[in-house]
């Protein structure tokens, strides 16, 4: 029946078109030439959030501190009864209690003398949004903006920190965090020195012509202490991962550090002057000074064997057993990560707590300790074995990818040292 209906409709369309072009126009010498009296230009509607906005007035705003959906809508003439129905109906799509201060929203109202709000759109993120229809249907649905990707290249030389090197070269400083994640198992980013340099090929993501962050990173060269460190992205066993120029994995059994971008305030020592007790005693860990609340991550997979409090010592602390050889301890925490309890399994990079100053401490920092076979060792000197490299059967394919990316990396010219020094001097003025 559907096929017969399609044939009939198609024949009807052909007959209609043949009649249109066979009609004889008036006042013309060429009766055989079809002439259309008028051409109607169809104007495409302007869409925002998937809604034709031509007939609406748009009000853009940000959620204020301690402001709720009811306050935002009620101030625009939406009744509390309607707001209550929206809140109840939206639970399966988006919990309105999760609306956060600082996030963007848009209200679409009619262009009448007394505007009537028809849509409320809450931007969950730079990409995702939730639409609330303020009509009889009270529909609630989610959507996503189009994300456009542009391939970028960057290079720079470290003067003070990798973060500042990004800023000095006009790059997104979040790229520094991405690089630190890629090389987390091979480079100690607390030991970055002046003169270290990098060049990278990556994607930058845009929404409405506004950059929303870093996308895929394809290749990196990071020169640290004169050594060239490479990272190339490669798909092995349906997993995208990074390998060096010899095909070795950049992932190791442990992260080099349990938190990002801070400074070492105290190192491993058998005789350190305690800052509170003012006596010399062993300090079998590394202190990382960082702001209170900085996330602390487990350096490897393992099991939590202690989550407790020491009033005259480490304050809130977490102890993790990684294998039969290594355990790690994280002390002076201001709080614990979600679902962190004795017996819990944790993954490498999982947040297990937050930097604080609990216990015997003069200020917020993390006291991080590593034990090997029951004895404390210097965390900065632990060498963890690498995970699986590129497999032999994949090496030919990897070599093609690596060589191609290497050629592109080498096209990125290093900035002359004279220019770097001039830029640094200008920055100080």
Image (cartoon, rainbow, N blue to C red):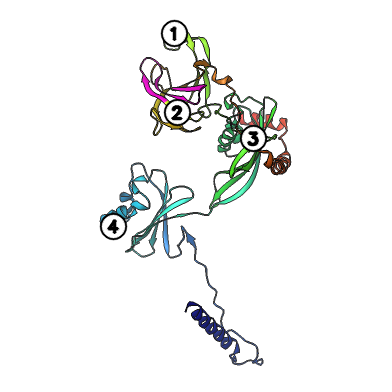
Q: Which label sits in the foreground, 4 or 2?
A: 2
Q: Which label sits in the foreground, 4 or 3?
A: 3
**Disc 3 from disc 1: Cα separation:** 49 Å
Q: Main secondary structure of the magenta part?
A: strand
Q: Is residue 96 above or below residue 179?
A: below
**Disc 4 from disc 1: Cα separation:** 65 Å
Q: Which label sits in the foreground, 1 or 2?
A: 2
Task: Check residue 190 for magenta coloring.
Answer: no
Where residue 118 sits in the image (x, y, percent)?
Answer: 36, 61
Q: Which residues are magenta?
A: 305-330
- Please say if the residues under marks 1 and 2 sit with CB atoms less than 8 Å apart: no
Q: Residue at x 53, y 15 (%)?
A: 268
Say which mark, if any, is on residue 82: 4
Instruction: State which tag comes first along the sequence, 4 or 1.
Output: 4
Task: Check residue 312 for magenta coloring.
Answer: yes
Task: Classify mark 2: helix, strand or loop.
Answer: strand
Q: Residue 416, located in which quarter of the rendered image?
A: top right
Q: Please state which of residues 287 and 316 is positioned toward the viewer in this rendering.
A: 316
Residue with the mark numbered 1 = 278
| Residue 58 seen in this snapshot | yes
Where residue 193 sits in the image (x, y, percent)?
Answer: 63, 24
Question: Crowding at label 3, few (<14), some or many (≥20) Cα neighbours within 10 Å?
Answer: some
Q: Residue at x 72, y 42 (%)?
A: 396
Say which mark, if any, is on residue 389: 3
Say which mark, if any, is on residue 303: 2
Find the residue positioned furthest to the left: 81
Question: Crowding at label 2, few (<14), some or many (≥20) Cα neighbours within 10 Å?
Answer: many
Instruction: State which tag comes first along the sequence, 3 or 2.
Output: 2
């Amino acid at each position: 029946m559907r096929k017969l209906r399609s044939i009939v409709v198609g024949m009807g369309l052909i007959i209609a078109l043949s009649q249109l072009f066979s009609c004889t126009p008036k006042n013309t010498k060429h009766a055989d030439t079809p002439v259309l009296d008028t051409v109607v230009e169809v104007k495409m509607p302007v869409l925002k959030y998937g809604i034709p906005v031509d007939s609406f007035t748009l009000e853009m705003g940000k959620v204020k501190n301690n402001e709720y959906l009811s306050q935002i809508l009620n101030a625009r003439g939406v009744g509390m009864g309607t707001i209550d129905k929206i809140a109840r109906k939206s639970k399966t799509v988006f919990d309105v209690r999760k609306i956060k201060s600082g996030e963007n929203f848009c209200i679409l109202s009619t262009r009448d003398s007394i505007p009537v709000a028809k849509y409320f759109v809450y931007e969950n993120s730079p990409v995702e949004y939730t639409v609330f229809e303020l009509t009889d249907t009270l529909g609630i649905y989610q959507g996503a903006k189009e994300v456009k990707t542009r391939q970028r290249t960057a290079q720079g030389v470290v003067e003070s920190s990798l973060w500042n090197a990004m800023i000095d070269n006009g790059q997104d400083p979040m790229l520094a965090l991405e690089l630190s994640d890629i090389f987390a198992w091979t480079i100690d980013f607390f030991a970055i020195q002046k003169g270290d340099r990098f060049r990278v090929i990556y994607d930058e993501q845009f929404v409405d012509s506004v950059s929303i962050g870093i996308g895929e990173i394809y290749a990196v060269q990071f020169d640290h202490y004169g050594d060239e460190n490479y990272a190339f992205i490669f798909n092995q066993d349906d997993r995208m991962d990074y390998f060096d120029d010899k095909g070795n994995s950049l992932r190791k059994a442990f992260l080099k550090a349990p938190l990002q971008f801070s400074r070492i305030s105290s190192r491993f020592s058998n005789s350190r002057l305690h800052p509170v007790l003012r006596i010399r005693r062993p300090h079998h860990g590394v202190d990382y000074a960082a702001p209170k609340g900085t996330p602390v991550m487990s350096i490897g997979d393992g099991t939590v064997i202690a989550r407790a409090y020491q009033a005259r010592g480490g304050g809130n602390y977490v102890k993790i057993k990684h294998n039969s050889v290594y355990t790690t301890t994280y002390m002076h925490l201001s709080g614990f990560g979600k679902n962190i309890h004795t017996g819990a399994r944790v993954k490498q990079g999982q947040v297990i707590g937050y930097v604080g100053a609990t216990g015997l401490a003069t200020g917020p920092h993390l006291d991080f300790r590593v034990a090997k076979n029951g004895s404390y060792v210097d965390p900065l000197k632990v060498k963890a074995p690498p995970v699986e490299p590129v497999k032999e059967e994949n090496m030919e394919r990897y070599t093609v990818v690596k060589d191609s990316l290497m050629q592109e990396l080498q096209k990125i010219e290093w900035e002359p040292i004279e220019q770097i020094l001039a830029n640094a001097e200008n920055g100080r003025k």
